[in-house]
Amino acid sequence: MQRLALVVSYVFHPLWTPLLVFLVLWVVDPWLQLPLGMTVYVTSILLINAVAPALSIFVLHRRGALSDLEVSKRSERTIPFLVVMFYQFLGYYALTRPGVFLPMELRALVLAMILSLGLAMVMTRWVKISMHLLAQGGALGALWSFNLLHDLGMQTILPLGFLLAGLVGWSRMRLGVHTPAELTLGFLVGFSCVRAVLELGIPL
């Protein structure tokens, strides 16, 4: 069971989740059937935003700034938060710079991820909010909102996202990293923040 929990935890790691969400949306949403060159460009940016922070966190761990790669100590989480946000801001700039024409909803999704991460960073002063469930909540919120906005007809399968989030939450508890309250809070913040940005709209 411990090995299964590790596999689930790494497969659905929060750094990879934005890329997975984009690929799912690219498959199911005709509005996001971008030209091949633009699809490769967006995929490359999201891949860099996954790999670069992971390498930075690994270096921080090797230099003794972090006790473990899970960043399980709440007191050590600020720097990793800032590292991830730095790369996300770079990614947002790369996706919104002059000459890059993307659907407004995609730009809003990247902005929503930055806002939810910033909110989680502030909340970490008081509680060790789960980044895995923040990402899962954000992913489900994104699929929920795109389904609503673009009438994708996924109403019957979207609830399965709650089961997946539950599986990821189980893996985090099994590994002894988070409590149920920290997991629930992470999911609610990610889900509500992404839906609010996408459905209410924020000037970009």
Image: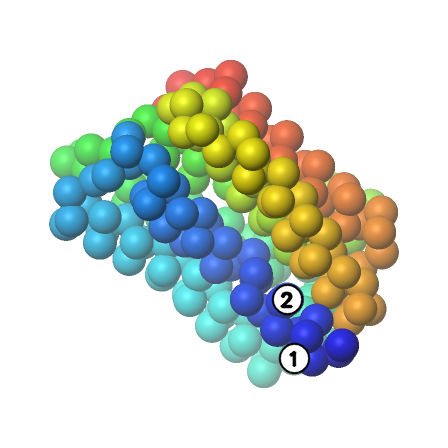
The C terminus sits in image quarter: top left
State whether residue 49 is above or below residue 66: above
Label 1: how many Cα within 10 Å (few below 14, some 14–19, many 20+): few
Say which of 125 and 188 sits in front.
188
Task: Give the labeled residue for mark 2.
Answer: 9
Q: Classify residue 28 as left or right of residue 177.
A: left
- Could you say where residue 91 lies in the image, as x and y percent from the top left? 36, 48
- Could you say where residue 31 lies in the image, as x and y percent from the top left? 28, 30
Task: Give the labeled residue for mark 1.
Answer: 64
Residue 172 appears in the rendering = yes
Q: Residue at x 71, y 37 (%)?
A: 188
Q: Secondary structure at mark 1?
A: loop
Amino acid marked by disc 1: Gly
Q: Residue at x 84, y 51 (%)?
A: 180
Amino acid marked by disc 2: Ser
Say which of 138 and 92 sits in front.
138
The N terminus sits in image quarter: bottom right
